[in-house]
Amino acid sequence: MKKIFFSLIILGSTIAMFYSCKKDTNKTPSDTTIETQHTDFEWEVYHKLKAYKQKKNSASRGLYPISLDSAEWYLDTQFNVEEARTEYPYKLEALDSTYFTLELNGSGMAEISAMSTMYNSMLDFLYNIVATSEYIPIFGHIERLSSDNNEAQYVFRLGLGNYYNGNYAPEYYDWKFGNMLGRCDGTHQWESDAGQELKTRLNNPFFAYVTPGSFVGSDNEKIIRYYNENGSANPTLYYDTYDEHPQSSQVNYFYYYETNASSSYDPCLESEEIEFYLDKAHKIIYTSENDYMPGSTIHRGQRPEGLTYEWFTIDTPNGYDNSSNLYYWTHRYYIHYRQRVNIPIPD
C-alpha cells in the first residue's frame, strides 16, 4: 500500500495536574464530610457497604440470608471499593480469571458466612498474583455462570495494570492486520499485530479519570464490527463518509475492514493507518451515545450515559464473504463500561 502522510489529531486535552498524595483510606470520615464530597449514589453505596460489613461482623450474621442478586452486588462492590481503587491514572496490562462456587441455603438464598468464604477466596486469588508481580488491581468482576437452590457458579475476572500518566504512545511501525503476525517487515511474529497495538494504547484510559475511584455495577459491553453475530453485514456502521482514511480508496471505515479477491492477500497497516484507527476508536469510546462524535454530524459515540469506560479488547477475524465473493480482514472491538465511584472504604 502506498504510504500517504497522515497527521493524527491530538486526542483529548492534556491533563496538567495529578493528585500529589494518596487519600488516607484508613481514616473513617464523618458522615458530613462524605455527604459534602460525594454524590447521592456514592453516599448510597458507602452506607450499603457499611451496613453489610457490620452484619458480617455480627454474631447473628446467619440470620440474614439475602437474594443472589444482592449477594453478587456486595461481593463485587466490596472487592472493587476495597481492593481495586485506583488513585492515579493507570494502564491496563493484563486480564486474569478463575472460578468460584457460592454455597446457597437450599432455597436459592445466600448466607453471609458463605459470602465471606467466597470473598476470602477472591482475595487469595488477588494476593497470589500481586505477590509475584508489579501489577495493581484495576477492577474485579464476577459473572454468574449457573445456579440452583444449593449453589451458584461464577467466573471472576481481574483487571491488572500499573500507574501510568503518559499519553498514547506514537506508532512508528507498520504491522500486519492481526493474528499476532508481527510487523510488515516480517519481524516480531507472535509478539504483536496492528490490533494488539491499538488495544495496548486504548487500555490506557488517561483521558477519563483524574480522581481516585472504583468500578461498580454491571458490565455494559458495546461491540463494533462489520459482521453481526448472525453473519449479516453492517456496512453503514462508522462508514468513512468524508474519506478521512489515509488509504481511502481501499479502506472505508473508522475501524479496519478490507477485502480482496485473493485468499493469499497479506494485509499490512502502515503506521499512519493505525494512528487513524486510534483516533477514531478514542472518539467512539469516549463520546456519549447521545452525542455526535467530534467532527461528525452522522456518527454518535458508544459510551452509555452515566457509565465510564473501563477496558477494551479486540479480535481480528478474517474469512470469505459469500455476498460479495471476496475475502475479508477486519477488526472487531469490545468496549466495556461501568459506573465509577469515589468513596472511602467503609469500616
Image (tube, rainbow, N blue to C red):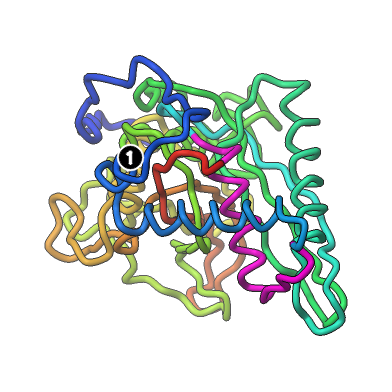
Q: Is residue 262 left or right of residue 296?
A: right
| 17 over 79 or under it: above or below | above
Residue 79 coordinates in the image, percent (x, y): 62, 46
Residue 72 coordinates in the image, percent (x, y): 65, 64
Q: Amino acid at mark 1?
A: Ala
Q: Residue furthest front?
A: 59
**Residue located at (57% from left, 48% from top):** 265
Q: Is residue 235 left or right of residue 8?
A: right
Say if residue 137 shows up in the picture.
yes
Classify residue 187 by image quadrant. Answer: top right
**Residue located at (50% from left, 47% from top):** 312
> Quadrant of the image for the N terminus?
top left
> 275 or 333, which lies in front?
333
Residue 13 coordinates in the image, percent (x, y): 20, 31
| 70 over 6 or under it: above or below | below
Q: Is residue 143 left or right of residue 9?
A: right
**Residue located at (39% from left, 29% from top):** 271
| 192 over 258 or under it: above or below | above
Q: Is residue 79 magenta?
A: yes
For the residue carrying disc 1, how many other residues have a C-alpha within 10 Å: few (<14), some (14-19), or many (20+)? few
Q: Which residues are magenta?
A: 61-85
Q: Is residue 137 magenta?
A: no
Q: Which residue is mark 1?
A: 208
> Quadrant of the image for the C terminus?
top right
